[in-house]
Each structure stands twice: as structure tokens, then as C-alpha cells.
Image: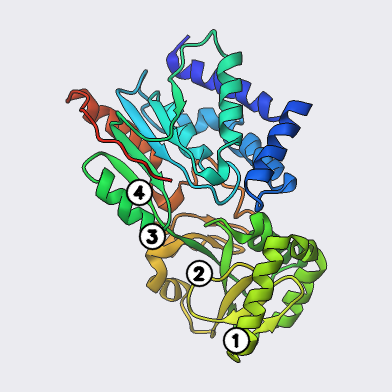
């Protein structure tokens, strides 16, 4: 069997593992929740469903892989530094490295150090008959030949210092935005609610800024969001952030629109506080790409009822309402094609020996 086909078979096994309901999985989920209070059983299971449906579907995998010249086996070793803001947020990076045939070592965030090792170890256990690239979970990256690292703007500077001389993909803070026309259906606005509230808004694909036409009825939107998403405010950490933001705005006399589940504030910045969303308005002559241009390098996903062709070459992705946190295999973070980079690294690695590498102790 061709090496790439073996990896696809292993991913099919992994997909079946993700869909097994047993006491062991329940124990792992509870352990992950105990480690990170932002994780809930609902959010973890949502992440598992998204990975299963969007990343591990066999037909989608084959179509995705056919777009690249995948090497039989990648040379050397790729290190991955993963974030931990939402459950299994680094899965796509591991998937790319695995499919490309590289051995990999993973430095997990302490906020999400339970789920991925469980599923990956189960896959290797059940796929022992296959010749697969190795995956190791480490406390410190060591002996790597290339790096994929995700973190905040501050940690990204740290990553560039340590990893800059190796082939690398280094990601930093990004936020997502939505464009409203005022003609959205209730179903689309409920989808927008998911784009805002899923994973408590902690992901870079969550909408943190809304562009709406002048005179847009924000109170009506907030009422709809409260009607469908009020339970989010029962989570103690989310509620603490909501209460803090509300007190801050009231004490400083900051104009805002208060809902029971969310606070809207008119603000040009695309990033917003947890439990709040920034918004700005545009007039009939406004050009959407022009509105986005100042934040070109800070946008992860643009949510709208229809694609915006003018910005397709400079944003991380576009999605329809309700799809922000359901990325496909082709939706690469920051718009950087991870698979293409890995294939290029393979060609580079063939021409040089493996180096003696430094180590890094990042979290």
C-alpha cells in the first residue's frame, strides 16, 4: 500500500475513534474540563464533530491531498507548538504534518494537554499494522528541522527569535469580522450568534467586530442573540468577563448597548473583549475592502452572506454565517498554506543534512 494511502487509512481509524462513545472518552473529557475551566463537554464534543465531519471525511481528504505533490515520506522532523484557547485547536497542523509524512514532535499548551494525546495514541494503537510517521508529545522541542508555532503577538516575537533560522510558520493574534447588510434572515443571524458565542468567543475565527449599515437595528439583533444564546452567560468565567466589561463601561461612561448575553460597543478595532463585540457602521457608498484594509494583517475570517472576491487573496478565509468555527481542510490559519509549505520543506530538506538543533521550552 502506498505510504499516503496508509496515512489515509490511519485517519479513517482516527475518525472512528472520535465517534466512539464510552466511559474512557467521558473520563478524558472530564479531565480536560478540570484542566481548563473554559472547556465544556458541549464545546469539546462540538470540536470533535467538526474534526470528524470536516477534516477526517475520506472523500474530502482525498480531494484535498490531490491538490499537492505529497512525498512518500517527509525528511527530518517538524516541531509544532500548539495553542490551547479552544479544544483541539492545533489538530489541523498535526494533520498536515502527518499527511505530509513527517515525523513530528508536539509541544502542547498546558490549557489543552489531554485530548490530542489520547486520540493520537489510540490511533497508533489500532493502526499498528501500518507504516506511519511518528508523533511524539514533548515538554521541549528538540532535534527539529522545521517549526509550526501558534501564539499571541508577544509569543510570536519569542518564536521568531528561537525559530527564525529554520523553515517555519509562525502565527500570532488574529480576529474575525462579519458584514451585515440589514437583509439577513433570522437563520443567518442565529448563525452569526454561533460565530460570536461558540467556544465563548475565544477563537481567532470567532467574530469580534461587526460592520453594519448606518441606522442598523442593533437592539433587535441583541434581543435575538439573547433569545437563542442566553445560556452562555451561565458559565462562570464568561459571566465574570461580562460583569467586568459592563462595570468598566459604566464607570468610564463608555457608550454601549447592553444585552443579557453580550455587550456591543461602537469601536473601530476588530478585536474585542470577551463577552463583548465591537461594531462600526458604513454608508451606501462605502467599499467593504476599503473598510477592511487597515486590518488586513489582523483578520482571520470574514463572515458575510456572500463571498467578497476583492479580498480573497489577502484574508485568511471567508465563510457564510454560522460557519466560522467549522473550517474545511482548505481553510488555513492566517491564509498560509501549511501543506504547500511542508511540501516545499521536503524539497529543501533533500538537499541538506539534518542539523544539530537548539531546543525551546515554550508554553
Disc nearest the viewer among 1 and 3: 3
Using the numbered discs, state the Cα–Cα distance from disc 1 to disc 2 in whole angstroms: 21 Å
Residue at x 37%, y 54% (from the top left corner):
155
Q: CA distance from mark 3 to mark 2?
A: 13 Å
Residue 349, given in percent of the width and then of the height, sits at 23, 27
Residue at 35% across, 37% down: 340
Question: Does residue 333 appear in the picture of this structure?
Answer: yes
Q: Residue at x 43, y 31 (%)?
A: 138
Numbered disc 4: secondary structure: strand
Render colour scheme: rainbow
Residue under label 1: 214
Which of the 4 image quarters holds residue 119? top right
Q: Quick one: label 4, few (<14), some, or many (20+) residues within 10 Å?
A: many
Task: Give residue 153's mark.
Answer: 3
Q: Which mark is residue 271?
A: 2
For label 3, the crowd category at 10 Å Cα-Cα, with few meaning under 14, some 14 to 19 and many 20 or more, is few
Residue 120 placement: quadrant: top right
Q: Secondary structure at mark 2?
A: loop
**Is label 3 or label 2 in front?**
3
CA separation in Å, label 1 and label 3? 33 Å
Q: Earlier in the sequence, mark 3 or mark 4?
A: 3
Frontmost residue, 280 versus 284: 280
Q: Residue at x 61, y 58 (%)?
A: 320
Please give the residue where the numbered disc 4 appears in the rendered image.
170
Q: Residues within 10 Å of mark 1 (few under 14, many from 20)?
A: few
Q: How many marks?
A: 4
Q: Earlier in the sequence, mark 4 or mark 2?
A: 4
Residue 73 or 85: which is nearer the viewer? 85
Amino acid at each position: 500500500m502506498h505510504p499516503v494511502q496508509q496515512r489515509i487509512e490511519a485517519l479513517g481509524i482516527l475518525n472512528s475513534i472520535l465517534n466512539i462513545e464510552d466511559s474512557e472518552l467521558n473520563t478524558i473529557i472530564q479531565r480536560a474540563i478540570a484542566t481548563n475551566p473554559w472547556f465544556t463537554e458541549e464545546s469539546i464534543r462540538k470540536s470533535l464533530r467538526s474534526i470528524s465531519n470536516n477534516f477526517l471525511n475520506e472523500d474530502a481528504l482525498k480531494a484535498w491531498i490531490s491538490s499537492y505533490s505529497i512525498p512518500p515520506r517527509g525528511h527530518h522532523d517538524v516541531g509544532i507548538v500548539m495553542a490551547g484557547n479552544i479544544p483541539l485547536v492545533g489538530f489541523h497542523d498535526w494533520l498536515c504534518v502527518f499527511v505530509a509524512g513527517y515525523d513530528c514532535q508536539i509541544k502542547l499548551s498546558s490549557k489543552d494537554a489531554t485530548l490530542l494525546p489520547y486520540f493520537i495514541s489510540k490511533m497508533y494503537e489500532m493502526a499498528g499494522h501500518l507504516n506511519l510517521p511518528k508523533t511524539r508529545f514533548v515538554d521541549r522541542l528538540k532535534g527539529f528541522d522545521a517549526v509550526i508555532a501558534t501564539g499571541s503577538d508577544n509569543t510570536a516575537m519569542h518564536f521568531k527569535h528561537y525559530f527564525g533560522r529554520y523553515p517555519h510558520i509562525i502565527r500570532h493574534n488574529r480576529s474575525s469580522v462579519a458584514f451585515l447588510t440589514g437583509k439577513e434572515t433570522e437563520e443567518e443571524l442565529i448563525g452569526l450568534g454561533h460565530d460570536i458565542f461558540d467556544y465563548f468567543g475565544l477563537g481567532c475565527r470567532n467574530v469580534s467586530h461587526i460592520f453594519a449599515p448606518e441606522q442598523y437595528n442593533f437592539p433587535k439583533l441583541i434581543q435575538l442573540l439573547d433569545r437563542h444564546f442566553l445560556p452562555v452567560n451561565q458559565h462562570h468565567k464568561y459571566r465574570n468577563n461580562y460583569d467586568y466589561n459592563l462595570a468598566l463601561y459604566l464607570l468610564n461612561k463608555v457608550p454601549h448597548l447592553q444585552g443579557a448575553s453580550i455587550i456591543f460597543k461602537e469601536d473601530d478595532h476588530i478585536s474585542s473583549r470577551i463577552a463583548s463585540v465591537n461594531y462600526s457602521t458604513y454608508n451606501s457608498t462605502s467599499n467593504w475592502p476599503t473598510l477592511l484594509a487597515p486590518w488586513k494583517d489582523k483578520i482571520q475570517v470574514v463572515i458575510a452572506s456572500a463571498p467578497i472576491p476583492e479580498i480573497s487573496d489577502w484574508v485568511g478565509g471567508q465563510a457564510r454565517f454560522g460557519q466560522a468555527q467549522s473550517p474545511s481542510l482548505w481553510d488555513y490559519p492566517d491564509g498560509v498554506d501549511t501543506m504547500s509549505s511542508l511540501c516545499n520543506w521536503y524539497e529543501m530538506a533533500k538537499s541538506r543534512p539534518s542539523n544539530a538543533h537548539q531546543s525551546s521550552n515554550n508554553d
